[in-house]
Amino acid sequence: MDGDRRNRLAALRTDIRRLERMAGPVRGRLSLGDPRLDSALPGGGLSLGQWHEIGGEGSEAETGAAPAAFAARLAAALLARPDQRGRSAVWILRRDDLFPPGLAGLGLPAERLVGVCARDEAEALGVAEDALASPGVGVVLAEVGAVDLTAGRRLQLACEARGGTGLVILRRPFGGGGATAGGTAAATCWRVAPAASAPNLGGLGLGPPRWRLRLARSRGGRSGAWLVEAAGTADEGEADVAHPLRLVAELGDRDLAAPAAFSAAG
Amino acid sequence: MLTAVSPQAAAAGLFPGQGLTDARALRPDLVLAEAEPEADARALEALADWCVRFSPAVAPDPPDGLFLDIGGVSHLWGGEAEMAADLAARLARDGLTARIAVADTAGAAWALARSPAAEANPRILAPGKAEAQPLAPELAGLPTTALRLEPAAVERLARLGLRRIGQLAGLPRGPLAKRFGAKVLLRLDQALGRAPEALAFRRPPTPWFARLDLAEPVSAPEDLARLCRDATLRLCARLEASGRGARRFRLDFHRVDGAPVGLELGLSRPARDPDRIARLFLPRLESLDPGFGIEAVSLQAAEAEVLAPGQSDLASLLEPIEGPEALAPLIDRLTARLGARRVWRSRPLASHVPERSVRRAAAREAEAGPARDGPTGGWPAWRPRPLRLLPRPEVLEAVIALTPDEPPRQFRWRGRVHRIRLAEGPERIGAEWWRTGIEAVRTDQVRDYYRVEDQDGARLWVFRSGLHDHDRPVRWWLHGLFG
């Protein structure tokens, strides 16, 4: 009985490993800027050549500002890698409100960015697929309402074609009902919410933005939650995209349940 | 006054230019219609567009003529005579009477087309005859009116007994120009190929032209796709043979009812790969309305540039992974699918008004932008700018702010109350007075921007419009969101 159980467990483990391998080859890892963050991700960093889902919490699910800023930091760090020299980012929008000077302040240069405004959800996903499978594209940022399993699998295949990395920013229409995604084929699923920042050194103006980051799902890894700060943005005077994030605190589940605690802490 | 008469009326002795009373006296049962020169001009333009199926270079010659440059395309019909016959037959089928003439010069063709002999059959002047010395009898026998001269000049010539082109051509040039004006000499020279003539073509003439004629009209989507591929193959074979690639293509389907429907395609770099070009056209064919059927298709290429032989074949094998060349096929695909306005690159523009500080360039535009200063790519880093800019600022409600120039403490936007815990600013942005003139600038157009952070840490870009004024309530707006 005991041996039987052990055998079954071993068989299941092999299955899981095989399923995980089906997810496609990883083309390197992107450091998020802090070893404590990276260690939570399998392989010690965000896997490239795969696609990741970034959603917002609360009103951010509509405005998509904090998730987009987080994605822009990741994209900037990715494009700064030597193996991405000469490659571009493609940002696919449904609502045409992206402002490139703001992206430049986050370290994503406008001259390496191609903007696309899709007419509907299917077109946005189609363009994302096409861009991911194209040479010369390092990272594709797509703002869509939801990615179902089929679309996710197609995105993954497109990523594997040329090693492009996809960052899908979930954003629902203003006032519209939330499209809750069931399962997902993404390598990681992040939830980003803004957090109260620390005052700037010297007390004048605003310091770098802070985000409450929740890793809701990670293929082959564990979930987690952190309080992070954007490091090396225009707010700090000099742009440094090698370390996109700075860890401020690790959060437990209890902290997540009561986000009000943070606003008070500010 | 009569401007045009029907064949029956002409037989009864009526002629254009005749007074209405005279005409009525001659034929009391005359049927009259108001002359509509504008409608005639429009019809001529439409006919010029229709004629693109015969040659890409069509120049309307108001009020009643069309010039077609058929150099290099008549072989597609098997010769000039066959082409003219086809044109005549198609026009006749549409109920248009036309006189057609083919000659080496536009002037000679004009003259021949208006000779009585052209009424029955197209007149073809063999190559080299227009310039021939002595003058070919076909031209020498034509009246001087065939030279496109002012009526007054024709009259002056007639007074001296000069009624035929042959008589004019024999005269010494100096006295002819002195006596009758340089225009007469110029028209004579243009007809005889001694002086060049520039025609105003509806589309710039291009030697890169391919067309396919169909025995039976088609309208099925798969037939259109096949036509598109065949035309592309033909044109690309010619481009390949001459070692060129083109950046712009135009595909025209000619419908049975005469209305052409077309698609334009622009590429970021010259190409002649038929598969790739056809693939860019195919998804857009659905948007075309074939009407009652398509009877011909023409494809023309423009902006042809030298492309090293074999380069395109190599490129498909070893696609460059880096550089802007690598991105070009994707941008071409997206532009063809979504339209040029939906695919863009952003360029900094020297303006401090946020809405105007970004210029959208076509994504296929080459990288060469203005010199960039600093990592923010032309936008000064010390001015914080939001990640998202609302298309138009949204007004904030229930704003609590100290006057005259404190940032807001609390406001409501989209039904949510935002309590501000940190703020930065103001950054004052005024209207660009150099655009409109200093007198048009008013203080209520000044915007004071603040970057604020609310109780949740969300960062917003708000502004107060206008300077503080006791008589007027201050209005606050939200213009953008930081991440």
Image (cartoon, rainbow, N blue to C red):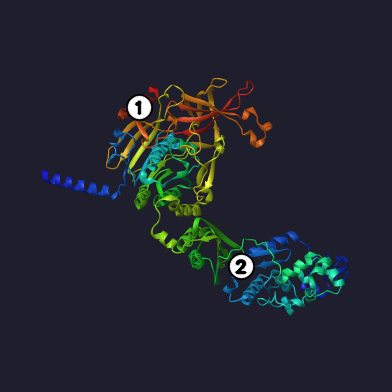
**Front position among marks 1 and 2:** 2
Res A56 quadrant in image: top left
Q: Quadrant of residue A33?
A: top left
Res. B374 mark: none
In front: B396, or A76? A76
Q: Quadrant of the N terminus of chain B?
A: bottom right
Q: Nearer the viewer, residue A109 or B168?
A: B168
Pinpoint the chain carrying mark 1: A
Which image quarter: residue B261?
A: bottom right
Kind of residue indicated by mark 1: Ala
User: On the image, numbered disc 1 is attached to which residue?
Assistant: A258
Q: Is residue B146 left or right of residue B254?
A: right
Task: List x then y, in percent, for residue B447.
Answer: 58, 29
Residue B79 image point, x, y percent: 60, 76
Residue A215 placement (x, y as % from top left): 33, 36
Which residue is found at the position 67% from the left and 61% from the top? B200
Q: Amino acid at mark 2?
A: Ser
The span from disc 1 to disc 2 (Cα, nearest Å) is 75 Å
The residue wearing badge 2 is B55
Regarding residue A108, the answer to whether it shows in the image is yes
